[in-house]
Amino acid sequence: MLVELIQSFFAGLGWPWGLPEWMQVGLVILAKIVVILVPLMVCVAYLTYAERKVIGFMQVRIGPNRVGFFGKQMWGLGQPIADAVKLMFKEIILPAGADKLLFLIAPVIAMAPALAAWAVIPFGSEMVLADVDASLLYVLAITSIGVYGIIIAGWASNSKYPFISAMRSAAQIVSYEIAMGFALVGVLMAAGSINLGDIVAAQQGGFWQWFWLPLLPLFVIYFISGVAETNRAPFDVAEGESEIVAGFHVEYSGMPFAVFFLAEYANMILISVLASLLFLGGWLSPLEGLLPESVFEITLLGSLLGPGLHWLVVKTLIFLFFYLWFRATFPRYRYDQIMRLGWKVFIPLTIVWILVVGVMIITGTPPWFDVA
Amino acid sequence: MNFDMPNFLPAMPEMFVLGMTSLILIIDLFLNERTRVVSYLLAQATLVGAFILSLSLYSGNAELSFSDTFVLDPMAGVLKMAVYATVFMVFLYSHSYLRERGLFRGEFFVLALFGVLGMMVLISAHSFLTIYLGLELMSLALYAMVAMQRDSRTASEAAMKYFILGAMASAMLLYGMSMLYGVTGTLELTELSRAVQQTQGDRLLLVFGLVFLLVGVAFKLGAVPFHMWVPDVYHGAPTAVTLFISTAPKLAGFAMLMRLMVDGLPGLQPQWHDILVLLAVLSIGVGNVVAIAQTNIKRMLAYSGISHAGFLLLGVLSGTPEGYAAGMFYAIVYTIMGLGGFGMVILMSRAGFEAEQLEDYKGLNQRSPWFALMMLFIMFSMAGVPPFIGFWAKLAVLQAVVSANLMWLAAVAVIFSVIGAFFYLRVIKLMYFDQAREQGSLKPGADLAVVLSANAIGILALGAFPGALMALCLQAMGA
Amino acid sequence: MSFEQIIFYIFSAILVAAAVGVITVRNPVHAALFLVMCFITTSALWLLLEAEFLAITLVLVYVGAVMVLFLFVVMMLDINIAKMREGFTGYLPLGALVAGGTIAVMWYVANNDYFNLTNMPPPERLAADASNTRMLGEQLYTTYVYPFEIAAVILLLAIVAAITLTLRHRTGTRYQKIDQQVRVKRDERVRMVKMESEERK
């Protein structure tokens, strides 16, 4: 939809101006990337604002409320922009004993996978930048590179707190990746595909058809592992401000620090989008089985109630809210407890549930697996 | 998708062993020091059950399954049953040894059974893939077993050497396989042999592949010049583990040699014949001569094992079914004798004392005439003195060599085994004509005494009636 | 030169450079990171060969898990490079001989007639909708099911072996027993005491 809009826009400008073919393809892809990433960056910025506001309300505070636009306060809506500008103009401090090259590369390595993973995320049945066959695996592989950003940052800083943090997060992320991978195995078994678009399509048929119900344990484990993967509270021992100050980014300032920040929030959004795609039917409408077909034919209301990007956004926002809610509610796990939870609780549970899913598929348990 | 269900029946023993091993792994979690014996009994039951299964599946013809990656032929049947019996004996021998050294853990039996499974896969392999996987399964279990005694420096060192050299040998093997695959385009052995026969033109690449394969096989058999790990590993590992790795894997190694050379590469027979001659002569020579210089009985037996590997190769290189049967006969006989030899070391040792030095056997006759006699049987048999079974084994391979018109090779083998007889006889001299260093009679546990006696008397009895075993081997090779 | 070839040469160049980096840099952490780079570029080359499942799995397994643990260990170790290089010149002739021999064999193998373009023509291009993953899966679970299961057993054995060699039951450690904590009842922790109220003096 959006893509066609852009294409027709360029066609109106007299596209393609006689450029060689590969350059045309490149430009179209570049345009698509911009269309995905710019809203993403805005979301990231306003997610930080939402975090401060939500946690503020939960703790009966007000949160940021001073910086607005045009001389008005506007509930502090200008805060993220002000923060960004501030960080951009701060000095980048290089610690004396640091490995300079790696120190500066680290935030880039953290950021790049968080953005690259978006290439295969479908926003609608045809709206995807790269319709890769094994897109779920691709997401898993690309996000697993992100941990290098943290490890390299911790090591290159040549300072003890960042190093401790790097070790913690390396072990934590590798451990939870197993549980997460197993949870995804359940999903791809249920859907019979590792293409994200096909997985969503397999959940057609309304709220009760989505995978959250037959795969409930995997759903819960996936999201908790996702929280652990992104190093967010209550699994944020890698930052652990009360023990190791700020962990891997103690020595960072200015823009490199901001990039780490962006990567963390982009990853949060990614995990939330994935959770909605895999378990909550992505862009599908929850009302599908409940309302009569004719309702979806109504011009404006129909497309609002029917499947569409807005449902994906709503579902993603729910998960993002969970993220913030967790942070406001739970105390930080101790390190050995994190490891115990990952290895001794989640992994066995997922393995058992994969078995259950297999049995359900073979026996064709209705209402999810009765159609072949 | 069309999928023909493979015939699972020929692989029943493998599935049974795997299932039982996994079961023991779980049951062992719920056992404590006192009830640990359950793991041991279950492991023995597994071997007995597998034996019965293999026996009931035994038939005269070969059966392929799993897209021709698996074969059950008479050779596989006999060798598998020999492996079960050997490992059964190993467990009997090591029971009290492990207990005294705090190694009596479920993991020992689980690892050993995984090793057995690896050997079974290797013996029944009919494709490069299964040969390699079986070999790795077996070797990985062996590496871990050698390292199990974590607080022993020698055991850790032995495990390290074994692992690194073993990994290199595996790499060589894979390299060779990759070359052969590149030329023939197949991994399956029957098809491979057909493709090799049809290959036109440059055969040098095939020979390169063959050489790398043989390096891998020679390493696993411990043939010179790929024998460096043998003495160190046999010496460093706990004796119960030495007992295991010096016996059953040899049967699997023999099977691997047969599968690769006879099943897969008969088209290269002239080439592998020459290489095997070289390996055999070197093994018999080095094994027998260097053993003389050893003062440690485990090292001595290790070199003896190297020379026996050479004899085993003599049978295979003759290139006739009778020769293969002789090689198989030799492999089985060697495992029986090896069991006795290392079993004796276990019997002599006790907690805190390993009875590894030759000196420890001085005057054994005064301390226990019966066990001295048993050791005498074992040593005579290894030296190849009639009427013990070792004699018949040597005779069979020499006959095969002679019938292949390699008189000089037979002469060399005989000369070196006469030289080798020296160190076996030295043990007997120490036992009967030297003064004991420590007094007091030897009081082994009843089970150990019975097993060892049975083993040694078996060597004598089989020596008196070698016909049945020989006939079995001949039948297995279709001679 | 087609666009694909340009990509191939770019990634190959990076791969070779990174591989040289692995063995030449002095810092072991840098070497490990170069190895990561090797894996990623290799995976890109595999993508060009239409082996996307393998390419993605390479990144997932080697980059995402194996190398992370590898780095973990390398960073913790204090490797003395100078000591490691001791005796380097002593072994150099032998090493050079072995390396020379290996290269000669490889050269011979790779230049053999068996592997020229007439005997080994490049494979057909797959259709755009051919699913590499599905094809691999079907092969693994039908034709190669037996080797596949054996490979799984090897992994199980590796787990058992690793745990056998590292697990030590230390006595006297005071670790958290979560199941007991969860199972605790109120009565076990709280004692209600009835007390008479007292008059203030």
Image (cartoon, coloured by chain):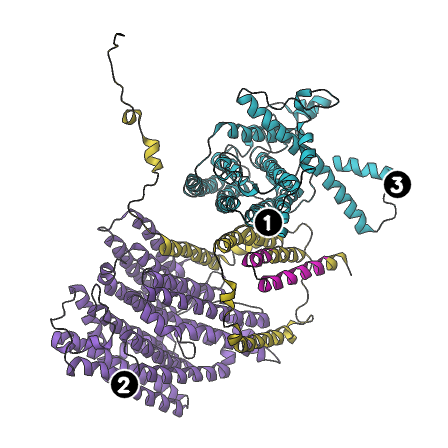
The quadrant in which residue B148 appears is bottom left
Q: Residues within 10 Å of mark 2 (few under 14, many from 20)?
A: some
Circle nearer the viewer, 3 or 1: 1
Q: Chain of mark 3?
A: A
- Check residue A14 in the rendering and tell me which mark sits there, or answer none: 3
| Residue named by callout 1 | A96
**Is any atom of residue A369 visible in this view?**
no
Q: Main secondary structure of the magenta part?
A: helix
**Label 3 to label 1: alpha-carbon separation:** 55 Å
The quadrant in which residue B103 appears is bottom left
Secondary element under disc 2, as helix, strand or loop, is: helix
Q: Is residue B281 left or right of residue A60?
A: left
Q: Mark 1 belongs to which amino acid?
A: Ala
- Check residue B44 in the rendering and tell me which mark sits there, or answer none: none
Q: Are marks 2 and 1 on the same chain?
A: no
The reply to whether the magenta stretch includes residue B242 is no
Which chain wears cyan?
A
Give the quarter of the figure containing the C terminus of chain B: bottom left
- Check residue B421 in the rendering and tell me which mark sits there, or answer none: 2
Q: Is residue A367 left or right of residue B22?
A: right
- Residue A100 point in image, percent of width and height: 62, 51
Q: Chain of mark 1?
A: A
The shade of chain B is purple
Q: Residues within 10 Å of mark 3 (few under 14, many from 20)?
A: few
Which residue lies at the image location 25% right of the left edge and 9% below the top edge? C198
Region in magenta: C7-36
**Label 2 to label 1: alpha-carbon separation:** 72 Å
